[in-house]
Amino acid sequence: MSLRQRKRVATEQAIVDAAMTLFARDGYAGTTVDDIASAAGVGRRTLFRYFPTKEDILLDPRRLDRQGMLSALRERRAGEDDVTRVLRVLATMRARAFAVFRPAHQRVLHRLSHGELAGRSLILMQLARDVIVESLVGKRASRDERLRARVLAMACVVAVDAAITAWIEAGMSDDLEKVITQAGRHLREGFARSA
């Protein structure tokens, strides 16, 4: 990484760290962009160069590497079914997209993405779903093929979200990838049997 790239990464990390500390202490609504900029040691204009909105600090659609996802989804490993492949790619993309969030941030990020920022979280889920569908079926797919792809994609996206919720509720001591694998097993087994 060049000096300029390292400075950019350090500034982004400082903004995220400051925001997460303030969100944990004062709440999302109680934290202003000026508060975050001041705590991060940057100007308001600098903050907006990195994050166009306060929501973007947490859930920035630009973090979704669309081309990376499409490329990874085209790769099918030996013996890998669609659920396993999609969950593998989602887990990898989630780790990359949210690498800027430290372990200490996870509870606050989860609480906000399921509370005050649930709408933004849903938009990101739908963006991921659309990329998955695009990789699974071509433009000439039948209605049934497209329906299957949409159900599979959204089920996998929600399975990852459910796995993250279970991981956080259990104290984040388990390996998250194992919890995501367990969620995939539940998807493959289905829910036809009675509880």
Image: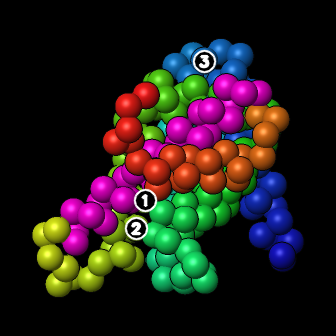
Give yes or no for contact between labels 2 and 1 (Cβ–Cβ under 8 Å): yes
Q: Is 73 part of what is drawn in magenta?
A: no
Residue type at tag 2? Ile
| Closer to viewer: mark 2 or mark 1 | 2
Label 2 environment density (alpha carbons within 10 Å; few <14, some 14–19, many ≥20): many
Main SS of the magenta segment?
A: helix
Q: CA distance from mark 2 to mark 1?
A: 6 Å
Residue type at tag 1? Ala
Give yes or no for contact between labels 1 and 3 (Cβ–Cβ under 8 Å): no
| Residue span colored magenta | 145-171
Name the N-terminal-most of marks 3 and 2.
3
* Image spot of residue 3 (x, y percent): 86, 71
Residue position for label 1: 128
Q: Is 147 part of what is drawn in magenta?
A: yes
Q: Residue at x 17, y 84 (%)?
A: 140
Give yes or no for contact between labels 3 and 2 (Cβ–Cβ under 8 Å): no
Residue at disc 2, secondary structure = helix
Residue type at tag 3? Gly
Name the N-terminal-most of marks 1 and 3.
3
Which of 181 and 33 lies nearest the eye of the viewer? Answer: 181
* Image spot of residue 133 (x, y percent): 33, 68
Residue position for label 2: 132
Q: CA distance from mark 3 to mark 2?
A: 34 Å
* Image spot of residue 108 (x, y percent): 65, 28
Q: Quadrant of the N terminus?
A: bottom right
Residue position for label 3: 27
| Closer to viewer: mark 1 or mark 3 | 1
Q: CA distance from mark 1 to mark 3?
A: 27 Å
